[in-house]
Amino acid sequence: MAAIPHLNVDVQDLGADLYAFSGHKAYGPTGTGVLYGREELLERMPPWQGGGEMIETVTLEKSTWAKLPFKFEAGTPHIAGIIGLGEAIRWMQDYDLDAMAAHERTLLEHATKELLAIDGLRIFGTAKEKVGVISFVIDGVHHYDLGTLLDQQGIAVRTGHHCTQPLMDRFGVSGTTRASFASFNTIAGGGGDGGWSEEGREDVAMKPRTMFHHSLRLALLVSGCGRFSARGKPRQQFSGFNFASWNFRNAGLPGSLLRESR
């Protein structure tokens, strides 16, 4: 689940039998994650993988399994990654999740309003309580082309069918461009016009329906939506958060998001 960095999640309140989330969805390293399960269910479940540390006894006739959670943790774990995930979780706990959610809501509402002002742009997914993501298409512009243009300007978005091909078929599109917001994103500065330059105004006035027009406006409004460009190079964010020099304790988030007390 991707709710962890956006909402207060209480698995007991949810009554979940199983709950999982990926570490990179919670500002942690890739290749890490957490699986929660009800103890009585996990006790009844057989291990899914064999290896070191997940057995209690082994004979030629049978094996018995180690106690929870070890019977599900065969072999050498991703030690460095889990240490990083733990630090990411501690970092999140320094901040007020409700304030972070409100900050993302502000970003979402601002970006939605500005993007809808672009001719031919359609947004898919308008649920009232959705988190900070916007999936959209622009008439006459392939999502891969738009993603490439934005990447060249240092703007990271995701393009494609997003692992939901049946949903794309339902909407009659081959894919969408998706911008995702997080607590380290900010609204680009420069006044109420979103930071447009005079040169940008002239270009847009001369070519209002070109792909350059679309990519320029998106670049101004959706800056810092992703961590990396399509070429995998770290991008400097408007908020001053540089992933090339990651520092959880000095991540450049707005001070208003910090918890009042620790």
Image (spheres, rainbow, N blue to C red):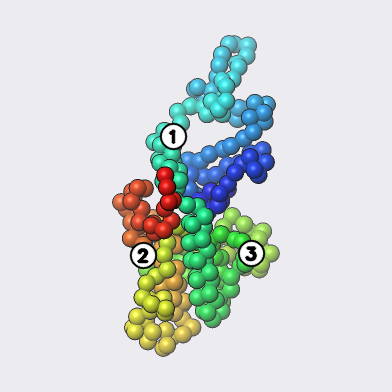
* Disc on the earlier residue, 3 or 2: 3
Who comes first in sequence, dot 1 or dot 2?
A: 1
Mark 3 to mark 1: distance in Å?
37 Å
CA gap, disc 1 to disc 2? 32 Å
- In-front residue for pair 19/80: 19
Nearest the viewer among 209 and 260 is 260
* Amino acid at dot 3: Ala
Q: Tell whether 17 sits left or right of 112.
A: right
Marks 3 and 2 in Cβ contact (< 8 Å): no
Image position, residue 42 (x, y; %): 64, 29
Given the current orientation, which residue lies at the most extreme bottom position? Answer: 206
Q: Amino acid at mark 2?
A: Phe
Marks 3, 1: nearer the viewer: 3
Q: Nearer the viewer, residue 229 or 68?
A: 68
Q: Secondary structure at mark 3?
A: loop
**Vertical order, 69 against 256 (above or below):** above
As shown in the figure, which amino acid type bears the numbered disc 1? His
Residue at point 44%, 37% (across, down): 82
Residue 81, quarter of picture:
top left
For marks 3 and 1, the one nearer the N-term is: 1
Q: Which mark is residue 78?
A: 1
- Can you give x and y, in whole percent of width and height, for residue 166 in the image? 67, 59
The structure residue drawn at horizontal position 59% and vertical position 11%, both measured from the top left corner, is: 60
